[in-house]
Amino acid sequence: MLLADGRFASGAGTPILNWLDEVKWDANGLVPAIAQEVGSNDVLMFAYMNREALARTAETGEAVYFSRSRNRLWHKGEESGHVPKVHEMRLDCDADVVLLEVEQRGHTPGIACHTGRHSCFFQLYKDGAWHTVEPVLKEPERIYK
């Protein structure tokens, strides 16, 4: 049974386990997080989460990350309106990477990248150079006002 504070009660007389304790946090208290689109399985972005970000993601059903550059929680889409609805959260076999299965909202097709593209992984290495292979769906100046 899941309790309001994020802990699981595992049965009568057994200790209560906090699911966040199962994650292997790095020395800075962070865990890598990959956002993958439900349906297409496109990898949309990579970011970091701290304990509070992961807990808020589970609580709200929307992706919350920890911004290392801003040194604060970052509710994805707080400025752009491109909010990822989390359908599923998974933890890898080593418990040190989180995978979020998301539906990218706020624009059709979904925009996950601050450059206005569907995915942050829009550069392809080919013939000794990086090539842009995904179009800008919405100019950043029109996203961030």
Image (cartoon, rainbow, N blue to C red):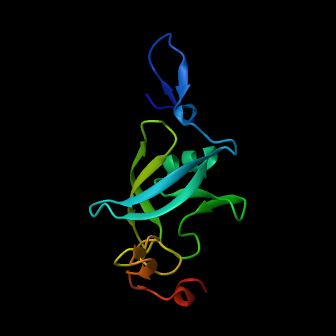
Going by the picture, which residue comes out furthest to the front?
A: 128
16 and 92: which one is in front?
Answer: 92
Residue 109: quarter of image: bottom left
In the rendered image, the quadrant that contains the C terminus is bottom right
Image location (x, y in percent) of residue 87: 37, 53
108 is higher (above) or lower (below) than 44: below
106 and 130: which one is in front?
Answer: 130
Image location (x, y in percent) of residue 86: 42, 55
Image location (x, y in percent) of residue 75: 58, 62
- For the point 50% across and 13% down, the residue is 14
Going by the picture, which residue comes out furthest to the right?
A: 71
- For the point 53% across and 84% down, the residue is 143
Going by the picture, which residue comes out furthest to the left?
A: 39
Residue 132: quarter of image: bottom left
39 and 82: which one is in front?
Answer: 39
Relative side of 66 to 112, left or right = right
In the rendered image, the quadrant that contains the N terminus is top left
Give the mark count: 0
Residue 41: quarter of image: bottom left
Q: Is there any visible trace of residue 16 in the rendered image?
A: yes
Q: Is there any visible trace of residue 6 in the rendered image?
A: no
Relative side of 12 to 108, left or right = right
- For the point 53% across and 89% down, the residue is 142
132 is higher (above) or lower (below) than 33: below
Image location (x, y in percent) of residue 127: 39, 78
